[in-house]
């Protein structure tokens, strides 16, 4: 794996500017170095496609519209078309037709990523419940495995979270708990397809029944799985329906910037019916700057991202997505077979393209420590400690699955008699941070330390350091 060297920081403008050639040379060098982290397939998730031809197309499409603001619809009717077609393709894949068959008008919006889609779904259901049911102390019921963006949304929008436990064996949400927790103020249930920690799928059919029975919303978080599970189902894998075929599903998120293979910065939020989407809109007719309308949280939006996402989806088509999905599922199941060879390791639930494993025999982070020395970059998880591997395009290269199994066999031997009792690696979402998971750690102090970490990622150099 390439060594990540810190770059000398710039604390102000260059007096004369470097010129395009020098800047591009610098960018080429940085990108080459950083691409080395994932290019050989030893990095979990985050780089979903890894196919240079797709990245080139996306970059070229972006460059033609990078300066376009999708807000100014009269100047760029193309953006209305691109957005409509991205949403139509997503609805096609996720059975919007089932909602049409019930006389509804399924539709969507495009936001900046999975978190925005989730925040928007929470906001929309809160507004809907206030307008339609007079609920002003809204609650939502979340599986513990739901992505943390739901907690973030609850924090932003003042929605109370009821956290539902999951069955430790299946990792699926405890339906009895959900059923018992539904009350007068419940506005939203949540299920994932699949969840981030284990890649497993909640029982969406049963959650849908509850949502219909109580007349409440159900958001299915398909941010991660929305653009790959449907192809897996078509390929014949055992993947239960999780989309609008269930009548209780009111919103569904699917990230174009993950397995949709578009550039980072877009996600689709689908609505079962147009009427619900209107609760997401912001309009202000009496602003001095003019009558203001906005479908979602963003103001100005990049026409480049929308054009590039559209270009990739149209260029790949059904056959392109199916072919990439076939390779990903085959690789993921081969890698899981490598895990199953070791009785000391345990897969969590019944995963498909994304899986996690733990150990009842030793601290699984010893395995992670060893795998790191072999260039692997997994995501560490906690409660219980586990290693998470989200299989993406780069792992489908020849030999990567075999190398995983061989390195894992050595890692298990290492973990059986590690050099020190406490492993070095730990659980930091989106990174491989220092170990900070001691059971008795003071949560208040830990929160402050995590904010210190964020400060360090946002630090500007000062002139004296230049
Ligand atoms: C299941 C799930 N939901 C939501 C998100 C959040 O997506 P984003 O990072 O694009 O905001 C993720 C990210 O990995 C995810 O795995």
Image (cartoon, rainbow, N blue to C red):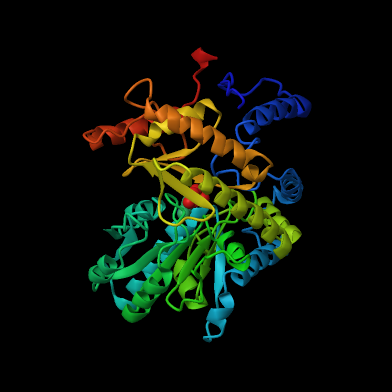
Q: Please determine whether, in this image, residue 135 is positioned above or below residue 365.
A: below
- Quarter of image, res 142: bottom left
Tally of marks? 0
Q: Please determine whether, in this image, residue 22 is positioned above or below residue 348.
A: above
Q: Position of residue 434 (x, y in %)?
A: 39, 28
Side of 35 where 140 appears, left or right:
left
276 or 349: which is nearer to us?
Answer: 349
Q: Position of residue 164 (x, y in %)?
A: 29, 60
- Name the residue located 56 percent from the left edge and 72 percent from the top edge: 107
Does residue 106 appear in this view? yes
Q: Position of residue 35 (x, y in %)?
A: 65, 33
Q: Position of residue 36 (x, y in %)?
A: 64, 30
Q: Please determine whether, in this image, residue 80 is positioned above or below residue 112.
A: below
- Name the residue located 48 percent from the left edge and 49 percent from the top edge: 355
413 or 397: which is nearer to us?
Answer: 413
17 or 32: which is nearer to us?
Answer: 32
């Amino acid at each position: 794996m390439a060594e990540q060297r810190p770059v000398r920081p710039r604390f102000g403008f260059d007096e004369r500017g470097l010129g395009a050639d020098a800047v591009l040379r610098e960018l080429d060098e940085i990108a080459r170095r950083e691409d080395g982290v994932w290019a050989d397939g030893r990095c979990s998730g985050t780089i979903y496609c890894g196919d240079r031809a797709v990245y080139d197309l996306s970059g070229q499409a972006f460059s033609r519209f990078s300066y376009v603001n999708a807000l100014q619809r009269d100047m760029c009717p193309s953006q209305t078309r691109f957005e409509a077609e991205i949403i139509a393709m997503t609805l096609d894949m996720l059975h919007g037709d089932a909602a049409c068959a019930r006389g509804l008008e399924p539709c969507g919006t495009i936001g900046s990523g999975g978190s925005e889609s989730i925040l928007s779904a929470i906001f929309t259901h809160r507004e809907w419940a206030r307008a339609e049911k007079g609920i002003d102390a809204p609650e939502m019921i979340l599986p513990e495995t739901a992505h943390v963006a739901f907690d973030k949304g609850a924090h932003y929008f003042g929605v109370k979270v009821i956290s539902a436990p999951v069955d430790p064996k299946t990792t699926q949400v405890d339906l009895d708990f959900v059923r018992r927790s539904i009350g007068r103020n419940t506005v939203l249930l949540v299920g994932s397809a699949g969840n981030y920690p284990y890649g497993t799928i909640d029982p969406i059919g049963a959650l849908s029944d509850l949502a219909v029975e109580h007349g409440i919303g159900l958001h299915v978080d398909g941010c991660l799985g929305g653009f790959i599970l449907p192809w897996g189902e078509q390929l014949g894998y055992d993947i239960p329906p999780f989309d609008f075929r269930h009548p209780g599903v009111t919103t569904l998120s699917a990230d174009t910037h993950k397995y949709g293979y578009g550039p980072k910065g877009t996600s689709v939020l689908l609505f079962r019916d147009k009427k619900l989407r209107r609760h997401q809109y912001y309009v202000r007719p009496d602003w001095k700057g003019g009558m203001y309308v906005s479908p979602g949280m963003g103001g100005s939006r990049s026409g480049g991202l929308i054009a590039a996402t559209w270009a990739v989806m149209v260029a790949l088509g059904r056959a392109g997505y199916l072919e990439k999905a076939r390779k990903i599922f085959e690789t993921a199941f081969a890698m899981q077979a490598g895990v199953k060879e070791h009785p000391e390791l345990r897969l969590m639930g019944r995963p498909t393209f994304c899986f996690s494993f733990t150990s009842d025999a030793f601290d699984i982070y010893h395995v992670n420590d060893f795998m790191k020395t072999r260039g692997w970059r997994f995501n560490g998880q906690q409660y219980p400690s586990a290693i998470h591997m989200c299989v993406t395009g780069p792992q489908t290269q020849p030999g990567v699955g075999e190398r995983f199994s061989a390195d894992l066999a050595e890692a298990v031997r290492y973990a059986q008699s590690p050099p020190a009792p406490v492993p070095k690696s730990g659980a930091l979402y989106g990174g491989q941070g220092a170990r900070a998971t001691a059971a008795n750690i003071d949560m208040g102090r830990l929160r402050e330390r995590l904010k210190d970490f964020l400060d360090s990622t946002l630090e500007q150099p000062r002139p004296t350091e230049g």
